[in-house]
Image: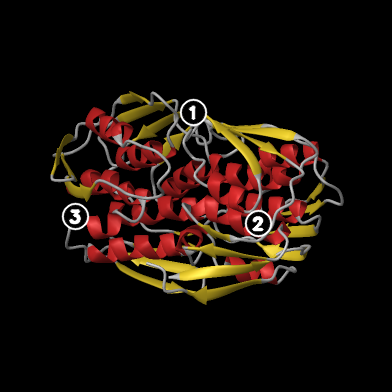
Amino acid sequence: MDKFIVDGGIRLEGSITVSGAKNASLALMPTCLLTPDAFRLLNTPDNRDVLTFRRLLESMGITSAMDGHELTLDSSAINSHTAPYEHVKKMRASIYVLGPLVARYGKAHVSLPGGCNFGPRPVDLHLKGLERLGATITIEGGYINATAERLHGAHFHFDVSSVGATVNVMMAATLAKGETLLTNAATEPEVASLASMLVEMGAIIDGIGTTTLRIQGVDALHGVTTTTIPDRIEAGTFLIAGAMTKGDLTLENVEPLHLSAELQALQDAGCTIDTTANSIRVRMDANPEPVDITTTPYPGFPTDTQAQWAAFMLQAKGAARVRDTIYPTRFGYVPELQRLGADIETGEGYCVVKGGTRLTGATVMSSDLRASASLVMAGMIADGQTEVLRVYHIDRGYESIEHKLNAVGARIRRESTQEF
């Protein structure tokens, strides 16, 4: 198990190239189950979650190879329709294999998923959507069993906007007989990216990027070469890190339109933001104004950057409220920031960050992927050194984050630890 040693009192300056989107990659990878053809996924990030998904697919007989950031997948020799617990327990996105398996093979045996521990995230919508398309579903021994002679088109309304359920049901609907209408579908860029890839594969989908998707089922799909969109969460993390270190940081390979909420909040806090078609520059030379944020589905402020925003507000000229309507219990990082000296109060579904308190380095522990990033960022502005334990969490979604940050002025070193 590794830890980070983070030196405080630094300023970030320079340029970082943003990786491909982790969440988009995890949605694109299971499309290989929809056809026996080979796929090439360019700009794929080399992080732990992608590796975990590759291992899951390989356990089913799929061939995968990673050359730099080019991922090749081939399911022509698939020999299992089971997604075992040993792989699925590590990552919730593993459930994305469920829809493609039952759509193409008529059967799936998928473990109930695991992932970051910040509250219950049921899979009910995934199952209800697939049942609406004609799948018979039972749960036994911690596994989802889904069968169908052939799925059929239907109208399914998502009770709440769900990225995962939209991804799963949309993939399944591409091979269903007839027309499927999905309403209140998620509109996140990762969902639109998947829909566009499915169209490249021969699917017929109207309404991409909107809450209403109309899908005409086809008999077969084919493999493609596609490029993964930039990671808007990594970009948001680095933008906030640049601002909180009073830096001058430029991000390359980024889609500014995917970060509209974060850019507005940064400007409200006093940052200078400059954008081009594929770059964002953030500059900050003073403590930020306190800015309240509330997480909502895209295009609102993302839940995956609320912990980083809370860390930024530790320097604010007053109190800022951080409210999460997506995962109201996602504040496990607060006690760890308090170990550094942060003044934060928590309530039901929110925390209030009181800026201006001096931070001092200490040993803190990561509790989930994005919490890890907030602790590293807080360590960069604390006095002295901060030890961040269990950085395997951060490795799930960031590719070599310490190397990227060190290249623009951070002082972060990775060390092995005997912690159990």
Q: How is the image coloured?
A: secondary structure
200 with respect to 378 (left or right): left
Q: What crowding class fits label 2: few (fewer than 14 Cα within 10 Å), some (14-19), or many (20 or more)?
A: many
The mark closer to the camera, 1 or 3, is: 3
The answer, for residue 35, to whether it is visible in the render is: no
Q: What crowding class fits label 1: few (fewer than 14 Cα within 10 Å), some (14-19), or many (20 or more)?
A: some
The disc at residue 72 is none
Residue 188: x and y in percent read 52, 39
- Relative depth, front residue between 42 and 175: 42
Q: Which residue is mark 1?
A: 211
Secondary structure of the residue carrying tag 2 is helix
101 with respect to 373 (left or right): left
User: Marks 2 and 3, Cα distance to the nearest angstrom?
Assistant: 40 Å
Picture residue at 19% right of the left edge, 35% below the top: 135
Amino acid of disc 2 = Met
Are discs 1 and 2 less than 8 Å apart at CB? Answer: no
- Relative depth, front residue between 203 and 107: 107
Q: Which residue is mark 3?
A: 82
Secondary structure of the residue carrying tag 3 is strand
Are discs 1 and 3 less than 8 Å apart at CB? Answer: no
The mark closer to the camera, 1 or 2, is: 2
The mark closer to the camera, 2 or 3, is: 2
Amino acid of disc 3 = Thr
Q: Which residue is mark 2?
A: 377
User: Of label 2 and label 3, which has the lower sequence position?
Assistant: 3
In the figure, 210 relative to 14: above or below? above
Are discs 2 and 3 less than 8 Å apart at CB? Answer: no
Can you say which quadrant of the picture contains the N terminus? bottom left
User: Of label 1 and label 2, which has the lower sequence position?
Assistant: 1
